[in-house]
Image: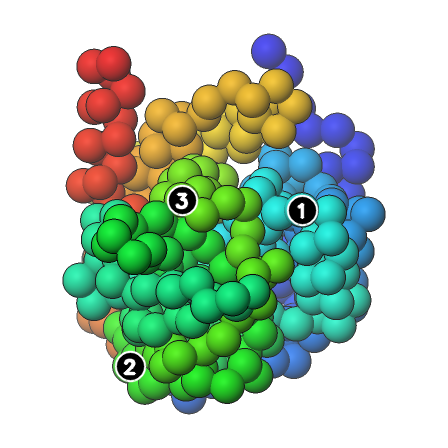
């Protein structure tokens, strides 16, 4: 077992860290306060090759391996988790994975190349009001009409929905006998019948756009169907497997930022005539925080490494992806909460960043499969 990263990965990690320190962290507070979409930061990420990371080089992306991706997105999240989620939901994980693993060569050329060349965004449109953890319960339909499909339905909590040029949409193809075949389609946002609904007012990740999508008689060419009719649920589950290590990596970056802030503050905040870091109670909190972050990091790196084995050998990494997501996101919530505690009353104030870290951390336990669902997945693998 080798725990050292290679020189190329080290260079990418350093580049991402410096970008986060210079181009993200100084603006994170204002972006959060104003609920402002990070358009300029995304343009810069694209220009330096830190966007659309999972897209292979032959389609215009950097094509980095999964471990390198985790190293990069961890650093971006250390600057701002909202920026990391906005970028990650595009070509780094969710929105384009169904196309990458299930699309034809023609589809990849038609969609991936312009997305990477022009820096366009895409959305992963799966969740519905009555279909969150239960992805099989989607109500959006696709009816075959000649060489087109007619899509009707709605989606909610869709990242990048207001700014996306493309939507990866999951819908049930319904035939004359009423049989439902979960399927996935690539839609262009300017297709007639697509409407963006209300933007969500969120507790955290406030610079990341989350909105509703509505589809009313949207005519979609049959060549926009990814895979075959009925492949949708398989591609959705595999996409979520692919994305879960990146949620873990974002959680680590977020936890690391909170930990670093807590350590620095504990050295300067004095009570009873000495810095609070001299108190054993604070030392124990910091020691636990550091240990938990490192344990989460190892799980995420392992899942990322196994993800690359899936690409090469088809070996399942579902259980390890769930390990990484559930543990790292729980650690992020605990570490950010402890950071607020170490800051005391100041931690509850928006004058300091730790309250933002705590607000941002909560969603990590909820999206891309809640942590209760992750435990069901893990239990299922244990009991197979």
Picture quadrant of residue 68: top right
Asked if residue 12 is positioned above or below residue 24 in the image, the reply reads: above
Q: Secondary structure at mark 1?
A: loop
Mark toward the start of the polypeptide (2 vs 1): 1
Residue for badge 1: 104
Give neighbour class at mark 3: few <14, some 14-19, many 20+ (Cα, 10 Å): some
Above or below for 292 versus 26 = above
**Circles 3 and 2 in contact, beta carbons < 8 Å:** no
Q: Secondary structure at mark 3?
A: loop
Q: Nearer the viewer, mark 2 or mark 1?
A: 1
The answer to which image quadrant residue 41 occupies is: bottom right
Compute the Cα span from label 2 to label 1: 37 Å
> What percent of the width, then of the height, locates residue 319?
36, 25
Q: Which marked residue is nearer to the observer: mark 3 or mark 2?
A: 3
Q: Is residue 40 above or below residue 319?
A: below
The residue lying at 47 percent from left, 34 percent from top is 300
> What is the crowding at mark 1: few (fewer than 14 residues within 10 Å), some, or many (at least 20)?
some
Residue occupying the point 21% across, 49% down: 134
Q: Quadrant of the C terminus?
A: top left
Residue placed under numbered mark 2 in the picture: 201
């Amino acid at each position: 077992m080798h725990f050292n990263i290679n020189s190329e990965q080290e260079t990418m990690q350093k580049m991402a860290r410096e970008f986060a320190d210079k181009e993200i962290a100084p603006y994170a507070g204002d972006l959060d306060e104003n609920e402002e979409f990070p358009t300029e930061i995304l343009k810069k990420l694209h220009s330096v090759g830190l966007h659309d990371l999972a897209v292979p080089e032959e389609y215009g992306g950097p094509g980095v391996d999964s471990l390198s991706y985790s190293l990069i997105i961890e650093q971006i999240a250390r600057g701002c988790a909202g920026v990391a989620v906005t970028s990650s939901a595009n070509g780094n994980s969710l929105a384009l994975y169904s196309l990458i693993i299930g699309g034809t060569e023609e589809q990849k050329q038609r969609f991936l190349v312009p997305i990477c060349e022009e820096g366009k965004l895409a959305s992963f449109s799966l969740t519905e009001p009555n279909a969150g953890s239960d992805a099989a319960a989607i109500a959006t339909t696709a009816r075959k009409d000649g060489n087109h499909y007619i899509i009707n339905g709605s989606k909610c909590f869709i990242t990048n929905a207001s700014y996306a040029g493309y939507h990866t949409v999951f819908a049930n193809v319904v035939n004359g006998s009423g049989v439902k075949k979960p399927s996935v389609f690539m839609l262009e946002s300017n297709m007639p019948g697509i409407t963006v609904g209300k933007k969500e007012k969120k507790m955290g990740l406030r610079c990341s756009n989350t909105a509703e999508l509505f589809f009313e008689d949207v005519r979609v060419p049959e060549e926009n169907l990814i895979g075959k009719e009925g492949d949708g649920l398989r591609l959705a589950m595999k996409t979520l497997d692919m994305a879960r290590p990146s949620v873990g990596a974002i959680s680590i970056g977020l936890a690391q930022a909170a930990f670093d802030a807590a350590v620095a503050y504990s050295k300067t905040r004095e009570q009873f005539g000495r810095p609070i870091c001299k108190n054993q109670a604070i030392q124990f909190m910091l020691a636990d925080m550091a240990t938990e972050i490192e344990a989460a990091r190892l799980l995420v790196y392992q899942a990322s490494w196994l993800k690359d084995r899936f690409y090469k050998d088809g070996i399942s990494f579902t259980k390890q992806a769930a390990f990484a997501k559930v543990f790292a996101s729980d650690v992020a919530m605990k570490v950010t909460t402890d950071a607020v505690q170490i800051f005391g009353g100041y931690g509850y104030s928006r004058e300091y960043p730790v309250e933002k870290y705590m607000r941002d951390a909560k969603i990590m336990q909820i999206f891309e499969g809640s942590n209760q669902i992750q435990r069901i997945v893990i239990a299922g693998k244990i009991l197979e």
